[in-house]
Image (tube, rainbow, N blue to C red):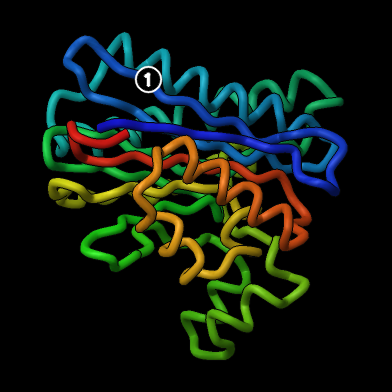
Amino acid sequence: MKVAYQTDIGHQRKQNQDRVNMFTNDDGNQLMVIADGIGGNRSGDIAAEHTVTVLGNRFKENPPQTPLEGIRWFARETQLINNQILTQSKRNVQLQGMGTTMVAAIAFKNALVVANIGDSRGYIFHQNLLTQITIDHSLVNELVKTGDISEDEALKLPQSNIITRAIGISPDAQVEVNRFELNEGDQLLMCSDGLFKTVEKDQLIAVLKQPISLQEKCTKLVAMANDAGSPDNITVLIGINSDQEG
């Protein structure tokens, strides 16, 4: 899979608490991960940095060999990182309350294992159809699921930034992990909420369809989020399951 990514502080935050990276192991499999630190000034960036770095190191040292192993690997490693962040928070008063969302994916041959906790998202773009493959762990999504509000209404509510799960907040990390088939030419889009809360789905599709490089697509989406007045940091990662493009 060819991958590009970009992160941006945005126009309204004093620091960028998003983290993004991609790691390749000796088998040629790839781990892509975005973490969006939470806790305001309470070191959300430290929690996000720790999550991305530790997950990447573990992927290179002790990677899963199959998609099924990948599902178990994500559950185990996320819980270990969660425990480490909780321990740090207890030892240092300045770090109390820190946490992070996470969306991560391992690309095996023609299969993708995706993990998420919080409201950073993953999508697959297949034959001009963009499908969200993660579940938002947020207060407004609980209302959407019960039919109390629509998805469009959810994005406009002031409570849209309240998440119900995160790494480093409770003893049980409760990560969501699923496997998806990946076809030739399919694109993976991962992002923090700074993108999807301000850029409409049809706009995301329009950019993904363009015959430009993955890096140019990332740059365009970040610029669109900023132009739309995104109140948050913005992070985008795009991968394509093809040897022909990039």
Name the residue nearer the viewer: 54 or 120.
Answer: 120
Give the side of residue 178 with respect to residue 78, left or right.
Answer: left
Quarter of the figure that contains the N terminus: top left
Residue depicted at 51% across the width and 18% down the height: 53
> x%, y% of residue 158?
77, 72
Depth check: give the residue in front, 179 or 198. Answer: 198
Amino acid type indicated by mark 1: Phe
- Can residue 99 be spotted in the picture? no
For disc 1, the neighbor class at 10 Å (few under 14, some 14 to 19, many from 20) is some
Question: How many numbered circles does the render carry?
Answer: 1
Residue 203 coordinates in the image, percent (x, y): 51, 66
* Residue 60 picture quarter: top left
58 up-or-down from 235: above or below: above
Q: Quadrant of the C terminus?
A: top left
Q: Going 74% across and 25% down the picture, which residue do you hit?
A: 90
- Helix, strand, or loop for circle 1? strand
Residue under label 1, please give it. 23
Residue 143 shows up from this direction = yes
Seen in the picture, residue 73 relative to 88 is either above or below; the reply is below
Measuring from the top left, give residue 218's x and y in whole percent. Answer: 51, 42
Q: Residue at x 37, y 20 (%)?
A: 23
Which residue appears at 54% of the width and 72% of the height?
141
Quadrant housing residue 8 = top right
Residue 200 position by quadrant: bottom right
Q: Position of residue 242 (x, y in %)?
A: 19, 38
